[in-house]
Amino acid sequence: MNRTTIADSIVLRLTEQKLSLQEMFAATKNGISYFYIDNLLPEEIVSNITSVFPKKEAMVQKKSLREYKYVAAQMDSYNPLLEEVVYAFQDPRVVTLVSDITSITGLEADEHLYAGGISLMAEHNFLNPHIDNSHDKNRDKWRVLNLLYYVTPNWQDNYGGHLEIWPNGLEQQQETIHSTYNRLVVMATHQRSWHSVSPVVYPGSRCCVSNYYFSDSPLKKDDAFHVTSFRARPGQKLKDFILTSDARLRMAIRKVFKKGIKENPHVYKKKPD
């Protein structure tokens, strides 16, 4: 089960469903474009991925008003299969197919896994509404697509931990895309692509493999550089004031320090050959 054989399966499923996926992505182009596909990988592969996924104690905890989750990008610290599946989504054939489905040209995968890799959300974990950082770690490329592959078997709709998108802003009802086992979600990212993850209300772990694709050009002509910016859920006025103030402060810092005051640790620092 290396990245090439895993990519073979991804290519097969995307090719089988290419027309319907194109239609799904095009139908959502006026808001936050996305498509999803179920049964992405053969059961033998995805069950093995699930079996080697690390416990939350072996990952990096991120806990604040913004979010509460566990992440990891240093893939050589875990079972080798996890690195293989992460990079299977970076296979040139997969990137080309996603480009064909979305009609976004010039897509590039991110070998450094800036904000990508693997993540886990346990009971009481959440991710508040936010827009992703607009660029890669060197601020050279625009972040344009978010790929989320869910690998937790029997994850029920009432467990929470589902992707929520807010195509009409936070004043309108969100749309929920469930974190179904063996489902790949591909979502556009730009300065209006507000999304969140609903709180997990079940004593289990919702596991995900994630990648970002970048491009020389932004998805929207009026896109401008922005840091990852969080908001509160509707009705949480004090929390929203704190989070918007936090985003403004971090944005002001980035205007002075292009790459921030300190390096973002969420990258894969590969050891020299």
Image: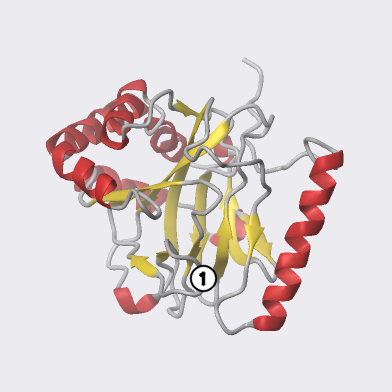
**In the displayed structure, would residue 255 be above or below residue 177?**
above
* Residue 195 showing in the rendered view: yes
Residue drawn at x 61%, y 73% as measured from the top left = 232
Q: Which residue lies furthest to the front in this view?
A: 222
* Snapshot quadrant of residue 172: bottom left
**Which residue is disc 1 drawn over?**
170
* Residue 187 % position (x, y): 40, 48
Residue nearest the observer in this picture, 266 or 137:
137
Q: Where is residue 57 in the image (x, y as percent from the top left)?
A: 60, 61
Q: Which of 48 and 8 is in front in this view?
A: 8
Q: Residue furthest bottom?
A: 235
Label 1: how many Cα within 10 Å (few below 14, some 14–19, many 20+): some
Residue at image position (45%, 80%) is 201
Q: Position of residue 220 (x, y in %)?
A: 49, 40
Judging from the image, the colouring scheme is secondary structure
223 vs 117, nearest the viewer: 223
Q: How many marks?
A: 1
Quadrant hosting residue 97 = top left
Q: What's the residue type where badge 1 is placed?
A: Leu
160 sits left or right of 117 in the view: left
Image quarter where the C terminus lies is top right
Q: In which quarter of the image is the N terminus?
A: top left
Residue 2 appears in view: no
Reply above or below: 143 against 59: above
Left or right, residue 77 beside residue 258? left
Task: Report helix, strand or loop for mark 1.
Answer: loop
Residue 224 placed where, x, y %? 63, 41
Q: Is residue 231 above or below residue 143?
A: below
Query: In the image shown, does 221 or 229 lie closer to the viewer?
Result: 221
**Residue drawn at the location 44% of the way across and 65% of the way down:** 168
- The correct choice, above or below, for 170 with respect to 53 in the image is below
- Residue found 35% across the figure and 62% down from its top: 179
